[in-house]
Image (cartoon, grey):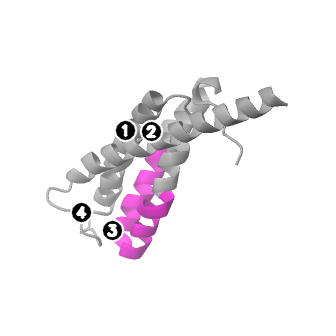
Amino acid sequence: MPLPPAFEDRSPVEQIVGAVVVTMVFGIVCGLALGWNEIVYYILVGPVALAGGFFGGMEHRTVDEGIVRGALGGLVFGSFVLLGLEILNTDPKAYLGDPQSGLVFVTTIVGGILGALGAGYRARRERELGGASAST
């Protein structure tokens, strides 16, 4: 699998759109799904959001950067999930725990872990690709 361009190599607009706007919109969509249908919500926050956190981390060259990106992405994502639910002004179809704001803590921690895993994967692949090109 080819590596995505590094976050620092992107323009400021691409950085803001990729790290903030996409995360906000996806969070709102997940929040709306949370108010509509439990299964759709779990599909979105399960494999789709987890993959997004990992791939977001893959845009960073160090694990430290991946943790920060993932934690901030998780913070924004979780906050906008709750905002999307609040827009519908309905009860969640899936259990969020009490208080519901605990979701933001969970998404922040999980996001940091996923960002670190993604950045670690990128670092390994860059070492492998660098070693392969040096040996040929």
Magenta-drawn segment: 23-48
Which of 135/81 is in front?
135
Question: Magenta segment: does it hold 28?
Answer: yes
Position of the C terminus by quadrant = top right
Residue hosting label 3: 35
- Would residue 1 be found to the left or right of residue 84 on screen? right
Comparing marks 2 and 4, which lies closer to the viewer? 2
Q: What number is the disc on residue 96?
A: 4
* 125 in relation to 135, above or below: below
> For the residue marked with disc 4, what is the amino acid?
Leu
Q: What number is the disc on residue 116?
A: 2
> For the residue marked with disc 2, what is the amino acid?
Ala
Query: x%, y% of residue 93?
Result: 29, 73
Pointer 3 and pointer 4: residues touching (CB < 8 Å)?
no
Q: CA distance from mark 2 to mark 4?
A: 25 Å
> For the residue marked with disc 3, what is the amino acid?
Gly
Query: x%, y% of residue 106?
Result: 28, 50
> For the residue marked with disc 1, what is the amino acid?
Ala
The residue positioned 31% from the left and 60% from the top of the image is 85
Of labels 2 and 4, earlier in sequence is 4
Is most of the magenta stretch helix, strand or loop? helix
Give the crowd class for mark 3: few <14, some 14-19, many >=20 residues within 10 Å: many
Query: x%, y% of residue 69?
Result: 44, 34
Of labels 4 and 1, earlier in sequence is 1
